[in-house]
Amino acid sequence: MPIKILHITDFRNLVAIEMESSHGLNILCGDNGSGKTSLLEAIHYLSLGRSFRSATPARLIRQTTEKFSLFSQLLIDSERQLPVGLERDRSGSTRIRIAEKEAESIVELASLLPVRIIHSQSHQLFESGPHFRRKYLDWGLFYHFEAFLPCWRQFERVLKQRNALLRSQRPKRELEGWTNELIKYGTELDHLRRDYIRMLTPYIKECTDALLSMPNFTLHYQPGWNETLDYATVLAHSSAEEFRFGHTLFGPHRADLEVKSSGVAVKHFLSRGQQKLLICAMIIAQGMLLAKLANKRLIYLVDDLPSELDFQSRHKLIALLAKQQTQVFITAVESKTIVDVNDKLDVPMKVFHVEQGRVKS
């Protein structure tokens, strides 16, 4: 559901924002430090209940105030809107409301408002550890498989308990029940990830073809253990080693996704601009799959789109985003770098000027 009306109060340096957004492109322009990225961060927080910039929620509350509030009217169709809102205060208390009723968790809001951010740290998908690539996969699994979230939660619970027993050197017989549970949920999680990659790969190839030259592009999923053996066999063979190290050495918590072109990992040869295009391709592909199989439209948040991209690359990226027929929020110092491209695409667009924490259309 696209965001029709957005209200932001006391979030970062945003004092009181009220904006009616376009269902197409929304360009947020302004000087550095004006609050453009904070506005994207607020939308991201409204969807997922967390920031992509800080792990400390108290830092998101504007100085001298006690809480921030985020409110939106989501567009169901041409005549109906769905109100959603989130508040968080300095004590850590969070209140979520959907259709004027209290929601139990952020999961309910995330399912209504799928959002993906592309920003200056997105290159971690290639250059940092497997954790970032697992998060990329698991975001998609949340929306495509009802079984994913309970399976993932159970796996994390069992893994934590099993690791505690390994650290305390408990007898092997006490570990058996937890090991069997780990095999059950770990195997299910592995199957879900493999199914998702299989469905997603054609869309990634389509998007990479549209944005940059990637000969022989491949994705290779590593499950977190020797995939010539089943998970139960691997755990049985590694028990002595696990007792020595004090934690579970193999499983979906160690999984990784290799992204290669002509057999070489992309992080070794792509420029930062090319990495940005490939990251965009991989995220837009997730939105395409979401629209195709779940009939949901992903909202794209792109921070500083012109950075590291020449005019031709910007044109390709904006054209691909416009082709998705969904809502996009883009920040840039000057709107001209985006507007000039969009003039050739004839996509619904609004330009907002952000100045000292306030927005003018």
Image (cartoon, helix red, strand yellow):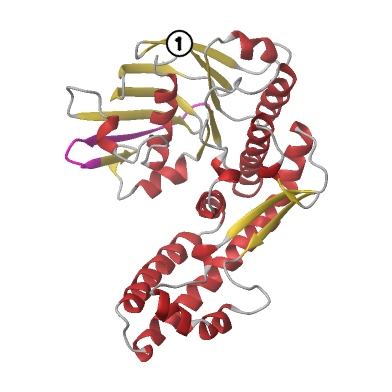
Residue type indicated by callout 1? Asp
Mark 1 nearby-residue class (10 Å; few <14, some 14–19, many ≥20): some
Q: Is residue 338 left or right of residue 159?
A: right
Q: Is residue 257 above or below residue 299?
A: below
Quarter-wise, where is residue 278 in the image?
top right
Q: Is residue 46 left or right of residue 62?
A: right
The residue identified by callout 1 is 31
Q: Is residue 133 left or right of residue 100?
A: right
| Nearer to me, 12 or 361 | 12
Quarter-wise, where is residue 35 in the image?
top left
Residue 85 included in the magenta stretch of the image: yes
Q: Is residue 335 above or below residue 46?
A: above
- Residue 71 lies, in percent from the top left, at 34, 29
Query: In the image, which residues are magenta?
Result: 78-94
- Residue 118 lies, in percent from the top left, at 55, 33
Q: Is residue 236 above or below residue 197?
A: below
Q: Is residue 27 above or below residue 279?
A: above
Residue 360 appears in the figure: yes
- Rendered residue at 21%/42% (across/down): 92
- Rendered residue at 25%/24% (across/down): 62
Q: Dot 1 lies on which element?
A: loop
Residue 147 appears in the figure: no
- Residue 318 lies, in percent from the top left, at 67, 23
- Residue 279 lies, in percent from the top left, at 63, 38
